[in-house]
């Protein structure tokens, strides 16, 4: 479940494929209004606008020059580009990246990014439709949009990495949480053997099912930048007690670098099994003096 080149789809052990430009984002289907309101109020996220990458004084990977994109002007990209750097530029800088929520309009883009991984470990087209319809507020995409010379035609942004997640009442990712409910279009809740299947509204655990990066852009801190931004937003919004993900052994150090802890072998048999449960507990907020 992460960009392998930086230590990471539904599991993250493979490589990513090329992408298509971002689709029209005007039809963003926002899922859980409670979550969205809390995100807006507590984390300063204005929906459906794009997000700048987080400022973090302790993190050289995230830079203050990133800017947001206004989806209300979805087909016109006037001056959303980063300023040229006067300091040493990184491979990430060359992408002129920004992050924003995903929607069902991005499904084709996500499928192409997900092709990086072995077929058995990819999120399917139908699962993308389901997850980006039911809980798009739990997704995040990193896009690239280059600087333009005067007179050049404005390009459309390209998705280079994504995080896709749902909620679960369990403390870790389970096979049930990863399934596609059979009749989800007509039923708000789905159960098998009296246990919930798929996304559980109100679940206290954010279960990440895919952290994927296009192969061409692996090794450029795209995966780590996405994960840092995602964790920051969930923590600041206070909409969950923890984030959980499953990973292969060689990716355990990658997730530990963000504060995840290994909880041993996972019971998940998705993609053939062999996963490790990784969990990031948020814990109580410090008391104000």
Image (spheres, rainbow, N blue to C red):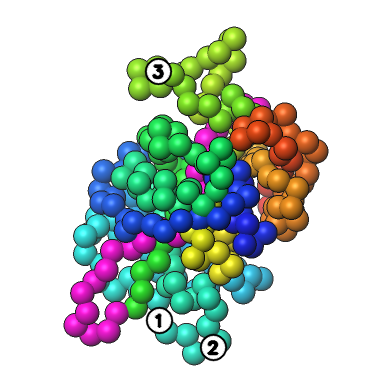
Magenta-drawn segment: 148-171
Relative height, residue 288 to residue 148 (above, below): above
**Disc 3 marks which residue?**
183
Mark 1 sits on what residue?
83
Q: Quadrant of residue 5?
A: bottom right
Label 1 vs 3, first from the N-terminus: 1
Q: Residues within 10 Å of mark 3 (few under 14, many from 20)?
A: few
Left or right of 164? Residue 70 is left
How far separated are the C-alphas under marks 1 and 2?
A: 11 Å
Q: Nearer the viewer, residue 267 or 285?
A: 267
Is 226 on the left or on the right of 265, as rendered?
left
Label 1 vs label 3: CA separation?
A: 48 Å
26 versus 192 height, above or below:
below
Extreme residue toward the front, this view:
119
Q: Is residue 22 above or below residue 272?
A: below
Question: Residue 222: x percent and y percent?
Answer: 54, 63
Q: Earlier in the sequence, mark 3 or mark 2?
A: 2
- Viewer-closest of 129 and 235: 129
Q: Secondary structure at mark 2?
A: loop
Q: Nearer the viewer, mark 1 or mark 3?
A: 3
Residue 203 in view:
no
Disc 3 element: loop
How far across and down, in percent of the image, does residue 233 sit? Answer: 54, 52
> In the rendering, at what x and y percent does residue 237 appear?
54, 46
Relative image position of residue 156 (x, y in whole percent): 28, 64
Residue matched to label 2? 87
Q: Quick check: can you spot residue 138?
A: yes
Mark closer to the observer (3, 2): 3
Residue under the image location 56 percent in, 69 percent down: 220
Instruction: Using a 10 Å C-alpha cutoff, classify the residue at mark 1 as few (fewer than 14 neighbours), some (14 to 19) or many (20 or more).
Output: few
């Amino acid at each position: 479940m992460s960009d392998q080149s930086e230590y990471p789809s539904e599991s993250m052990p493979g490589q990513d494929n090329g992408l298509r430009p971002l689709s029209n984002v005007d039809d963003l289907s926002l899922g859980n209004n409670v979550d969205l309101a809390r995100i807006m109020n507590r984390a300063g996220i204005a929906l459906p606008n794009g997000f700048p990458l987080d400022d973090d004084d302790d993190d050289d990977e995230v830079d203050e020059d990133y800017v947001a994109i206004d989806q209300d002007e979805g087909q016109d990209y006037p001056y959303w580009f980063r300023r040229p750097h006067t300091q040493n530029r990184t491979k990430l800088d060359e992408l002129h990246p920004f992050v924003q929520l995903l929607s069902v309009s991005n499904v084709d883009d996500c499928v192409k990014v997900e092709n990086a991984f072995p077929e058995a470990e990819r999120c399917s087209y139908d699962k993308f439709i389901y997850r980006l319809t039911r809980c798009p507020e739990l997704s995040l995409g990193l896009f690239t949009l280059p600087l333009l010379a005067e007179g050049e035609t404005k390009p459309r942004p390209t998705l280079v990495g994504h995080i896709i997640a749902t909620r679960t009442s369990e403390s870790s990712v389970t096979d049930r949480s990863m399934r596609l409910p059979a009749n989800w279009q007509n039923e708000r809740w789905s159960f098998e053997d009296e246990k919930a299947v798929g996304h559980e509204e109100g679940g206290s655990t954010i279960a990440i099912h895919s952290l994927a990066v296009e192969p061409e852009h692996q090794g450029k801190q795209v995966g780590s930048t996405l994960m840092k931004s995602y964790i920051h937003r969930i923590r600041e919004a206070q909409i969950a007690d923890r984030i959980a993900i499953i990973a292969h052994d060689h990716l355990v150090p990658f997730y530990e670098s963000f504060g995840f802890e290994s909880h041993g072998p996972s019971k998940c048999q998705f993609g053939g099994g062999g996963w490790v449960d990784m969990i990031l507990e948020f814990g109580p907020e410090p008391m104000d003096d």
